[in-house]
Image (spheres, rainbow, N blue to C red):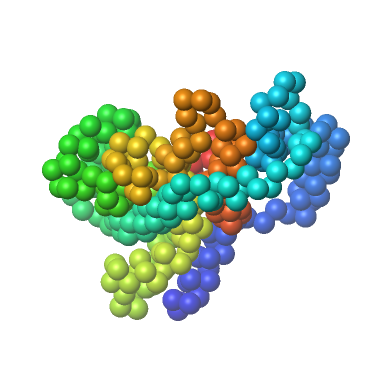
Amino acid sequence: MSAAKVISDVERSVAVPVVSGDRSRTRRRADRTPGLAALRILLAVIVLFPVLWMLLTALKPQDEAISWPPSILPQTWDWENFGEVLARGEFARWFLNSAIVAIATVLGNLFVGIPAAFAFARMRFRGKNALFLLVLASLMIPGEVLLVPLFVLLSEWGWIDAYPALIVPFIANAFVIFLLKQFFETIPRELEEAAIIDGAGPLRVLRHVVVPLALPAIAVSSFFTFLGSWNSYLYPLVVTRSMEMRTVTVGLSLFTDEVGTDWPLMMAASALVAAPAIVVFLVIERHLKNTMAMSGLRG
């Protein structure tokens, strides 16, 4: 059997099972029941209302944003709030810092996580199970516990208030390794064996066989890594000192002072901060459910 034939068989085997015609029609009829539709609309309103409130508050003047009783729709649509946020302080620099840190963290996690997950899923070596349990055990350590030791270590290395301090400690994520390992194990070994017969070594199998089939899982793990790095607040606050090296989540505090909070500007800045994560989620949303199901993480 040729490698191409094996690849085709494996791709069909790892694809999401197609729902049969009768089951599909039954599911569509169930989805159209009034009670289920009403429940979905209610849940959507509950989930989306905070986002909608944030956007509407971002378009109000300050006096209208703090008025009582509060109004849902702005009486005066103040679109200049977004421009004022971008023009204020170092917001654009903080946005760039967050983008650099998040992208570098994602790339670092893929560089470390993919080979590690492949080794745990496919290779045999002494102490593999114990080492994998050690990796999983690291998930149970709260990040706050490591904050002081990391700060002392980074201070000795002279990395405080620099990009390496924001990136390097997070380029090996145990969750990414676990997620990719679970997905790699769903790929049948026949494909790997066919590639080995054709003369491929472990790195070639990983690059040309496993990684192309695992792109949905890689996209999902990249999303979680990006989201964690982008939303991080406490750690960047501790390891950065100058205003130029702050990340955008830390910079949101600029809109709160001893006088009070400028809520329209705060909400406008929060909307701009949330936008990249929402865009990334919409891009990989169709891979998220399938990957979780195939890797055994769906609740």
- Closer to the camera in the image, 27 or 216: 216
Q: Residue at x 48, y 77 (%)?
A: 4
Q: Position of residue 194 (x, y in %)?
A: 39, 72
Q: Is residue 117 visible?
A: no
Q: Position of residue 25 (x, y in %)?
A: 81, 50
Q: Residue at x 61, y 48 (%)?
A: 82
Q: Quadrant of the N terminus?
A: bottom left
Q: Is residue 152 visible?
A: yes
Q: Residue at x 22, y 38 (%)?
A: 150
Left or right of residue 95, residue 101 in this image? left
- All told, the count of numbered labels is 0
Q: Residue at x 54, y 61 (%)?
A: 13
Task: Give the image quarter of residue 129.
Answer: top left
Q: Position of residue 37 (x, y in %)?
A: 81, 37
Q: Quadrant of the C terminus?
A: top right
Q: Is residue 61 above or below residue 160?
A: above
Left or right of residue 26, residue 251 in this image? left
- Closer to the camera in the image, 265 or 295: 265
Q: Position of residue 147 (x, y in %)?
A: 27, 33
Q: Is residue 25 above or below residue 72?
A: below
The residue lying furthest to the right in this view is 34
Task: Give the image quarter of residue 57.
Answer: top right
Task: Give the image quarter of residue 81.
Answer: top right
The residue lying furthest to the left in this view is 156
Left or right of residue 32, residue 246 in this image? left
Left or right of residue 142, residue 153 in this image? left
